[in-house]
Image (tube, rainbow, N blue to C red):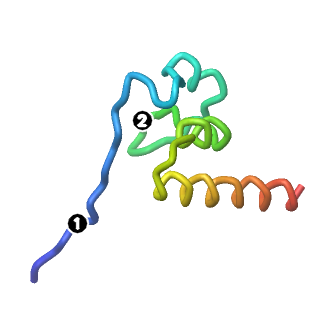
Amino acid sequence: MVRVADEVLVDLLGSACGITYEHAVADAKEIEVGGVRIPVASKPTLIRTKETIRPSDQIDRDFLEALIREEEAER
């Protein structure tokens, strides 16, 4: 039996679209993976890091904005 692991891509940047780690961590959410707490940028911060002309970033912004609308509708 051959097992193929999902590919995971992680971007490590000093800043993205002018957003630094210090800026992003201010409203970051924490998740736990394997007992390790990891800060994850909030959806609004992720949107700001995707303010480019790349089509893939537009898709990401649309997806994140839809998630935010869904969360607001559930409140």
Residue 27: which quarter of the image?
Answer: top right
Closer to the camera, 11 or 25? 11
Q: Which percent across, then down, holds residue 51?
A: 57, 40
Q: Within 10 angstroms of label 1, few (less than 14), some, or many (20 or more) residues?
A: few
Closer to the camera, 38 or 24? 24
Q: Which percent across, then down, holds residue 43?
A: 64, 43
The reply, left or right, for residue 69 in relation to residue 18 is right
State the residue position of label 2.
Answer: 36
Q: Secondary structure at mark 2?
A: strand
Q: Within 10 angstroms of label 2, few (less than 14), some, or many (20 or more) residues?
A: few
- Look at the picture and state if 18 lies above or below 9: above
State the residue position of label 1.
Answer: 5
Name the residue type under label 2.
Answer: Val
User: Residues under labels 1 and 2: Cα distance?
Assistant: 21 Å
Which residue sits at x=34%, y=33%? 12
Which residue sits at x=54%, y=25%? 19
